[in-house]
Image (tube, grey):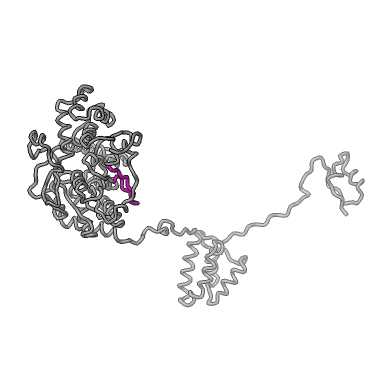
């Protein structure tokens, strides 16, 4: 989840960069963050209990992107359940169960779009998925990709890698990496290699008006206190207190005890143990249990203060119990702490092989345009084609090869193709094609076809000659004989003199 509303407050210090900037350097990646993004493509299948490897393909595509730009990826996965996050995990588990019930209900109601949205909320990323991704990447790239399973939270392990200089930057989707003190974080890595980079030092050095929140001159402890008051994975925010109110309190009172005292005075809804929760959240951000690859031992992210050691002991339980043997790299990643037993080797191998084949091979295209747009033929054309095929078979191989041009000529139009049955009845096709040509030159002598489904061409009847004497003219007399005398025509027309204008003089 991260810190509520943190990243939008620092858009002025956010830069768009390309991963090629970190060529020939190690970049640590939150593996579970990529898996969370990948499961959205197959949320319906996974939520309904089916099998899919689209999320594995998504992560492998991002790994291939980093390798293309000569970046050394180091995938880090979550380990055991952190006691400080137990309440948050229980709340998320209840939300997932509710989302799964709603998805099943929407699926029964045939509301597939709503069901897909609820399935996306109920799918959980498991260590089995992490193992599948490890096996698929190892099968394709080998030692070019490194892996590490954190003792507890991957965010704290990423912070240890970045702060120790083992990683030049980290790739994540959680804003609480800034609270862990990560110097450089790349958010929202796209398929083209661009990402949103946030440098922690730029936040503390930004002038007024650059960001929505001014944190100039702040210490890391003040920044962590603001993140804890705004709400994070380790403590819930008090009702009415957001990121802006938390910033206002910290900017005014500076010290955490004074800030909590002022908050309790302003807000009466603070729980009784809220101060203890905030203190534990701040200690979790700064001193969680991580694995040091150089020392090959489990250590705190930063040495525990003496006051905290006196209060909670040298190894506080909410920071994670010390481990006798922390998982060093990919060999231990095959059996995550939460599962206790690795996935079946045959299932993991088959899934890795399928992912590898889809990512490396270009399969032939089967769904071509011809399969969607078949050739459309009219009934007459289909009948003509079948008749031509039968005629070619009867005439023999040699005659069929010679008469092919004549048959193609007949099939060019439906009117010509309709004459094929009549041509067969008249004597078939000759070797030289003369009967066909003769019949085509004399279409009027073609006998009507006895086939009712494919009748021959109908001859259009000629129009009867027009009898102009049958027309009646208004106010006119019977037609007069042709005469050159115009006065005679006028007397024959009677009183009406229209004939003088309408009847032309005939010479």
Q: Nearer the viewer, residue 498 or 276?
A: 276
Q: Is residue 13 left or right of residue 340?
A: right
Residue depicted at x 46% and y 69%:
390
Q: Which residues are magenta?
A: 186-199
Q: Position of residue 114 (x, y in %)?
A: 31, 39
- In this rendering, the answer to whether 94 lies above or below 418 is above
Q: Position of residue 393 (x, y in %)?
A: 45, 72
Residue depicted at x 28% and y 36%:
6
In the rendered image, the quadrant that contains the N terminus is top left
Q: Position of residue 26 (x, y in %)?
A: 24, 53
Residue depicted at x 53% and y 63%:
450
Count of marks overlaid on the render = 0
In the rendered image, the quadrant that contains the C terminus is bottom right
Residue 45 visible (yes or no): no
Residue 256 visible (yes or no): yes
Q: Is residue 405 left or right of residue 98?
A: right
Residue depicted at x 35% and y 34%:
209
Q: Nearer the viewer, residue 69 or 335?
A: 69
Q: Position of residue 245 (x, y in %)?
A: 27, 28
The answer to whether residue 281 is magenta is no
Q: Nearer the viewer, residue 73 or 15?
A: 15
- In this rendering, the answer to whether 412 lies above or below 217 is below
Q: In the rendered image, which quarter is residue 269 located in?
A: top left
- In this rendering, the answer to whether 469 lies above or below 438 is above
Q: Is residue 427 left or right of residue 278?
A: right
The answer to whether residue 195 is magenta is yes
């Amino acid at each position: 989840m991260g810190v509520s509303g943190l990243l939008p407050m620092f858009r002025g210090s956010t830069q768009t960069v390309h991963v090629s900037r970190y060529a020939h350097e190690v970049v640590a990646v939150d593996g579970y963050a990529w898996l969370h993004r990948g499961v959205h493509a197959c949320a319906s299948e996974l939520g309904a209990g089916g099998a899919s490897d689209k999320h594995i393909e998504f992560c492998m595509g991002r790994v291939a992107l980093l390798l293309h730009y000569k970046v050394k990826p180091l995938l880090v996965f979550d380990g055991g359940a952190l006691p400080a996050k137990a309440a948050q995990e229980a709340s998320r588990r209840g939300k997932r169960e509710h989302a799964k019930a709603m998805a099943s209900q929407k699926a029964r109601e045939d509301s597939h779009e709503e069901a897909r949205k609820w399935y996306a909320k109920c799918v959980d990323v498991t260590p089995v998925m992490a193992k599948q991704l490890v096996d698929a990447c190892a099968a394709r790239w080998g030692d070019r990709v490194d892996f590490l399973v954190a003792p507890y939270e991957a965010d704290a392990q990423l912070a240890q890698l970045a702060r120790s200089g083992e990683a030049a930057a980290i790739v994540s989707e959680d804003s609480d990496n800034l609270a862990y003190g990560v110097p450089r974080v790349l958010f929202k890595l796209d398929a083209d290699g661009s990402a949103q980079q946030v440098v922690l030092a730029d936040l503390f050095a930004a002038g007024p008006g650059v960001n929505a929140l001014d944190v100039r001159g702040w210490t890391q402890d003040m920044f962590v206190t603001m993140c804890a008051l705004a709400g994070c994975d380790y403590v819930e925010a008090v009702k009415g207190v957001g990121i802006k109110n938390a910033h206002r309190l910290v900017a005014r009172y500076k010290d955490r005890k004074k800030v909590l005292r002022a908050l309790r005075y302003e807000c009466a809804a603070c729980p009784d143990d809220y101060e203890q929760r905030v203190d534990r959240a701040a200690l979790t951000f700064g001193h969680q249990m991580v694995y040091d690859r150089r020392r090959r031992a489990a250590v705190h992210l930063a040495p525990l203060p003496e006051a905290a050691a006196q209060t909670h002991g040298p190894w506080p339980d909410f920071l994670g119990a010390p481990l006798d043997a922390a998982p060093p790299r990919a060999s231990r990643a095959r059996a995550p702490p939460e599962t206790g037993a690795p996935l079946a080797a045959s299932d993991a191998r088959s899934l890795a092989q399928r992912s590898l084949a889809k990512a490396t091979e270009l399969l032939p295209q089967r769904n071509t345009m011809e399969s969607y747009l078949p050739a459309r033929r009219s009934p007459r054309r289909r009948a003509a084609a079948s008749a031509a095929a039968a005629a070619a078979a009867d005439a023999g191989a040699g005659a069929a090869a010679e008469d092919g041009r004549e048959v193609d000529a007949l099939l060019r139009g439906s009117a010509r193709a309709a004459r094929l049955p009549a041509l067969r009845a008249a004597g078939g096709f000759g070797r030289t094609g003369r009967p066909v040509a003769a019949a085509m030159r004399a279409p009027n002598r073609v006998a009507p076809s006895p086939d009712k489904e494919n009748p021959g061409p109908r001859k259009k009847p000629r129009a009867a000659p027009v009898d102009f004497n049958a027309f009646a003219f208004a106010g006119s007399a019977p037609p007069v004989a042709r005469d050159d005398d115009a006065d005679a025509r006028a007397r024959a027309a009677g009183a009406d003199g229209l004939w003088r204008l309408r009847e032309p003089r005939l010479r």
